[in-house]
Image (cartoon, rainbow, N blue to C red):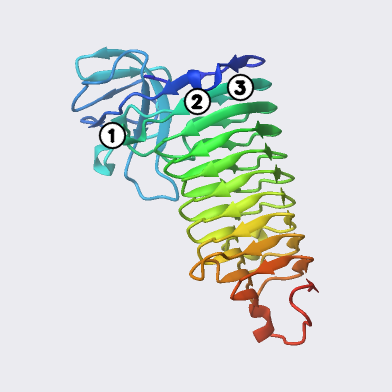
Amino acid sequence: MRNAVHLRPGITLRGSGEETVFKKGPSVTTALVRETDWFEFAVQVENPTGFTPGCGLALSTERTEIWPAMRLYTVTAVEDDVLYLDQRTEKNYWMSEGAKAQTLFPLLCAFNVDDVRVEDIVLDGNREENDHIDGNYAGAVFIQYCDRWTFKNVVARNYNGDAFSFQVCDDIHFEDCHALNNADRGFHPGSGSQRPLFRRCTASGNNIGLFWCWSVCDGVAEDCVFSGNRLHGVNFGHRDTDNVLRDCLIERNGEVGVLFRREVNEYRTPDRNRIEGCIFRDNGQFGVDIQWKAKDIVIRDCQFESTDASSQKVAIRIAPEAERIVIEDNLFRNCAVEIEDLRERRDSGHGDPRDRRS
């Protein structure tokens, strides 16, 4: 593929399972050789080889911000060393900030598109021949401001970034989907997305399996497998509230099975999330790590197992600042420490830690 498939409202994209593979072509990168301001329709590059009309294009700089300055375009024409774009640049791309052009893009992409189904396809990012791209701008699947999408039996693999990334999208459903061996996150519900649903999905071989990011609320992940990811199986953070993990297998993740990450202030904590009926096995340091001021977390009817003495030495860790953590009816097998409740150093007398409301 030389550019993304740009989906439109109300359509169904259906393949034949493993026989239908969308594979990204190798990427090329070149520096800009003329300053480009935010209102222009073209960029001048050092080497135009590999850029053709219709190809996908990412422009970016090395400016140090929270996220890089990056946008995606389509090349409409190439004249000598000038690439013409399908839209205004909308950002400044200055040589003094290391501006560059790359043939990077999502495999499936949409903005402001509702009511779409994607079924029975494989998305291959050809990671070995492509530069990395940030999951806030692209992924094997990348959609923004889109509602009511269903992905069924879709595999996203080997993308040098995120597998499935969506932002400001409501009611995005995944059934029997798989995120395999991607550079960053497997599933990345982001930025205000409401009611995402993950059912019978697998994330394996990514940096993070399921990354809830920035005010993702009322989501459900059930009967899923988050296994063998380099850092975390599941990660909650910035105002990700009222979500449920139910009947999932979370095993052999490099650092933590489920992380409730520390945020910069108490108004951004991942509160009122529930973990029910899950199995935690042989995760690197902790089965569940509840950091800082997370509140009203429930862990109920779960199993914590360690088959290797070097892994998951602590089943559940609770930070000193955490509040109203409910731990009920869980089973612990061969865990060196079942619950490391750091609040006890601050205030003793909580009773039996294996069955606690506090």
What's the CA distance linking mark 1 and mark 3? 35 Å
Q: Say which label, 2 or 1, has the lower sequence index.
A: 1
Classify the position of the C terminus by image quarter: bottom right
Occupied quadrant, residue 347? bottom right
Q: Which residue is mark 2?
A: 122
* Marks 2 & 3, CB-CB < 8 Å contact: no
Classify the position of the N terminus by image quarter: top left
Check disc 3 and give the amino acid type.
Glu
Position of residue 209 measured from the top left corner of the image (x, y, whole percent): 54, 47
Q: Residues within 10 Å of mark 1 (few under 14, many from 20)?
A: many
Occupied quadrant, residue 77? top left
Check disc 1 and give the amino acid type.
Lys
Check disc 2 and give the amino acid type.
Val
Residue 207 visible in the shown view: yes
- How many numbered badges does the structure rendering display? 3
Q: Nearer the viewer, residue 184 or 15?
A: 15
Residue 8 visible in the shown view: no
Name the side, left or right, on which 286 lies relative to 217.
left
Q: Which residue is mark 3?
A: 119
Q: Quick check: 208 above or below 352?
A: above
Q: Residues within 10 Å of mark 2 (few under 14, many from 20)?
A: many
